[in-house]
Image (cartoon, rainbow, N blue to C red):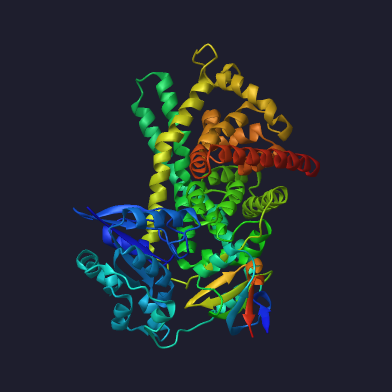
Amino acid sequence: MTKIALCGNPNSGKTTIFNALTGLNLHTGNYNGVTVSAYEARLTNDVTVCDLPGIFTLKPDTRDEISACEYLKKSADKAVIIADGCSIEKIAPIASSLAEMKLPCAAVITMADLLERDGAKIDMDKLEKTLGIPVFISDRKKFDALRDFILSAEYRTVRDCSPSELQSCIVGERREGLCLFDRLLFSGGIGFVLPFILILPIIFIYSCISPLLTEVVGYFLELLKIFIVSRLGASPFWLRHFISEAVFGGALTVLEFVPSVVLTIAYLTFLEESGIAPRLCAVMSPFSESIGISPGAVSAFLLGFGCTVPAVDALRAVDRKSARRASYILPFFQCSAKIPVFYLFTAVFFPKNPVLTLFLIYLGGVLVSFAVGYISKLTSRSEPVCGVIELPRYRRPALRNIVHNSADKCGELTKKIATVLLILSSVVWLLCHLTPSLEFVGEDRYADSLLYTIGGMLAPIFAPLGFDSGIAAASLVSGIFAKEGVLTSLSVCAGRDGVKFIAQEVFGIPSAVSFLTFFALYPPCVTAFFAYSEEFGIFHAVKCALVQFAAAYILSFAVYRLALIAV
Amino acid sequence: MEQSLDKAEAVRAVVGKITGDENIREKLKKYGIEENTSITVIGKISFGGVIVAVDGKNFVLTKTLAENIFLIK
């Protein structure tokens, strides 16, 4: 089996080439550090291609770079150097190292059309002579030809050439400078409000579009529930009750939010693909620097608005110290799994100001992350952060990638509903309907149930925060397994009364605000915990969870006391 | 005469001395910024940070990093 490695600078189009060759749909984006580990796929029966994280040299200093360099040194039989046509001289250090290793190479030039748009072009003959290897210019319309090139090119040892030699292969003058939008963004002061502007569409989705979508999906779910329960007429009462309350009333409640979560992911993909994400890193760099975190980590925070797990993976592209510090505050950027719960509490307690409430939740998370980051910097020895952020050109996002990422999230969420959330709903339903001596009890005897007993034991922990009900405590425990579990647990406990009714029964406005604060800040789900553990070790994962729990507890206590005074 | 990059206005210049430890020099070398290379300062970030163009790409250097780079005027 021949292994061909696709290597090159970050954001040079390696994954796009890999996807075109293999027909796969690996995540792409218009910023450095999207690919953080090597990914192999078969091209033919005896040829494998591998998409590697971006590198500048073969002297790595982040974990993603280490994995790329190790693959090139230990596993690759051949390498294809992917070079961004607008800056081909940047591959000189990689070419030098590959020349030293004597690894057979070929090269593919991407984004040459952007260079031509600037009025310059590449002298291909000269470039082939300079590099001493076959070179192919990639084009979206010529992917078949690219595949033939990768399979049949005459791979040779690349020539050790200097950046200036490569630069001389560009005919014409490249345009330098910033576009008007970037000038306004960075120097005109607009940059400071960019994070707030970027949050607004998410809030718009949940305050304006979501109510309609949840109602439509909810209506069809209710019809399906009536149909299925009526078909179970002769079956035991407990089974009909389980289907109605645990399956439809619990796990499937989250299905109502799938369209809104998918829209959020589509929007985040748009930010990643268009080139706005690295601009956000750049405008936030003075703030990230002030808390000792490399500005590159800001793109991981942006991913955190979708899901904490890929955001933890994205920290591989950041230097180790910054990544560890960023890991403490990452979950304070609210993931999309928390949205159904935010939506419920906003609808019940703040129906007149949904936009403001959601905005404050998101803003609060960001402010807490900076406060915790700053305290962490003060309490630990740290060296000054030295960060470099590449500003890629703006690019029209590929609809295919937006649709693919959204469909992926939709599938992931549906799978979660059918597995984790269904199990959680079933457990909560059992706890609600079994006594400690395992007798089945009806809804009217909740005080005899196991949930009441267990919740009663947990309740004192949360009593100072204003929500000492067993239901609230049990729902927070469910949230450790999956954040949507809080909603499914409350729904199962509510039974026929409906989740909005039980929310009003269990919480007043001060305790609801305190519960929301705790929910927004307490440690992420177990999947994220495992991701933490894999990236940073179990000890650091536990330390992060403790810091997040402490921050959540202290702040919800403070918020509860303030709310008591205000209401 | 040398001027630190964080104080420089928009200008095409040659990089002179780079202060700080070896890590800083290595990090900058990765992006093509080393002594005697030509760079263009193309803008600044409100609250700190400098935007430079090197080898056809634009980069933002944080304030701390820019303070370590001196341009030959």
Compare residues A251 and A218 and report the one nearer the observer: A251
A262 on left or right of A453: left
User: Residue A453 appears in which quarter of the rendering?
Assistant: top right
Asked if residue A188 can be seen in this view, the reply is no
Quarter the C terminus of chain A occupies: top right
Compare residues A76 and A474 and report the one nearer the observer: A76
A240 on left or right of A369: left
- Vertical placement of residue A503 versus A287, above or below: above
Instruction: Report the residue that reaches farthest toward the top.
Output: A437
A37 on left or right of B25: left
**Residue name at image x 70 percent, y 51 percent:** A371
Residue B46 point in image, percent of width and height:
67, 71
- Vertical placement of residue A172 versus A328, above or below: below
Residue A165 point in image, percent of width and height:
39, 81
- Vertical placement of residue A131 versus A541, above or below: below
Residue A552 point in image, percent of width and height:
67, 41
- Vertical placement of residue A374 versus A283, above or below: above
User: Residue A235 appears in which quarter of the rendering?
Assistant: top left
